[in-house]
Image (cartoon, rainbow, N blue to C red):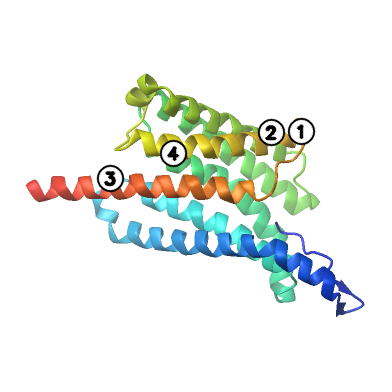
Amino acid sequence: MWAQANTVCGGVALPDQAAEVLRDRIPYILFGTVFLFIGLCVCGIAVMRRRSGGTFFTWLGIWSAIEGTEYLFGSLADLGLLPHWLLASLPYVGNVLSFSVVVIALLAFLDLSRDRLRLFLQGAILAGLAIAVVGIALFLFTGSSFKIMPYNHLLAAISITAMAIVVAVPKLSRRFLILPNRTVLSLGILVFALEAVYGNLSLPLRLPSPPEILDPLGFAVLLFCFGYVAVQSLETSSSTSARF
C-alpha cells in the first residue's frame, strides 16, 4: 500500500495509465476515508467514556484509524498526490503500522476475552511487541524487514484462528468470551478470519495472493459487527447505571 505507482514519465503524467490507477485506487480511498473517520469518532467516544471502564472502544478506534491511514495514504501515494516530504516518510510509517496493527487488534480482542483465552492473547501481544521491535529496528538499520514480516503474519493467522474457533463453538464462546451478542460478532470474526488467515499465510506459504479488495471488505464486516456489539454494550451499561 505504501509504494508509489509509476504513473509519470519524464515528469509528464501518462493519461491512460493515470486513469487506470485512479480507477483501481478509488475503492481503497473510500474505504480508507471511512475507516479513518470511524476510528477517530470511536476514539472520541472512548475519551468521553473513559470513566466507565474498559478499553474496547479505544483499541477498536485505533485499529480502524490505522487501517484507514494505510488505505488512504497508500492510495494517494500510488496516485502521486502526496508532497515529496510526506511520500519519503511513508515507508517508515507503513513499516511501523504494519507491525503495530497486529498488537492493536489483539488488544481489542483482549477486552472481550477471559480466563485462558485472555492469557493466550496476552502472550500473543507480548510476542507481537517483540516482533514489532525487531522488525522496526531491522527496517531502520537495513531498510528492509522482510525476514521478520512472515513471523508477524504467522502470529496474526494463529491469533485470529484461535478467536474464530472460540467464537464458532458455543460452549467455548460462553466460557471464554464476554459477548452481548454472540451471533453478530461470530459472523464478523469468522468472515474476517477467513480472509485474514489466508492473507497472512499466503506470503510465508507461497500461496496465490487473494484479491486485494477482500482485505478492506473483510475488515469492514468485522468493524460493523464490532460496532454493533460495542453499541449494545454501551446500552447495557447505561441501563444498568440507570437502575442504580
Find the residue positioned furthest to the bottom: 12
Q: Which mark is residue 201?
A: 2
Rendered-image quadrant of the N terminus? bottom right
Q: Alpha-carbon distance for marks 2 and 4?
A: 20 Å
Of 21 and 74, nearer the camera is: 21
Residue at 69%, 71% in the rendered image: 86
Q: Is residue 32 above or below residue 59?
A: below
Do the CB atoms of the residues marked 3 and 2 lie less than 8 Å apart?
A: no
Give amino acid for label 4: Phe
Q: Alpha-carbon distance for marks 4 and 1?
A: 27 Å
Give the mark nearest the N terminus, 3 or 2: 2
Residue 95 coordinates in the image, percent (x, y): 68, 53
The answer to whether residue 244 is visible is: no
Residue 165 coordinates in the image, percent (x, y): 48, 25
Give amino acid for label 2: Leu
In the displayed structure image, the side of residue 144 where residue 191 appears, left or right: left
Residue topped by disc 1: 207
Nearer mark to the viewer, of 4 and 1: 1
In the displayed structure image, the side of residue 56 where residue 134 appears, left or right: right
Q: Secondary structure at mark 1?
A: loop
Residue topped by disc 3: 233
Nearer mark to the viewer, of 2 and 4: 2
Give the mark nearest the N terminus, 4 or 1: 4
Do the CB atoms of the residues marked 2 and 1 lie less than 8 Å apart?
A: yes
Of 142 and 57, nearer the camera is: 57
Q: Is residue 153 above or below residue 69?
A: above
Q: Secondary structure at mark 2?
A: helix
Res 197 quadrant in image: top right
Give the mark nearest the N terminus, 3 or 1: 1
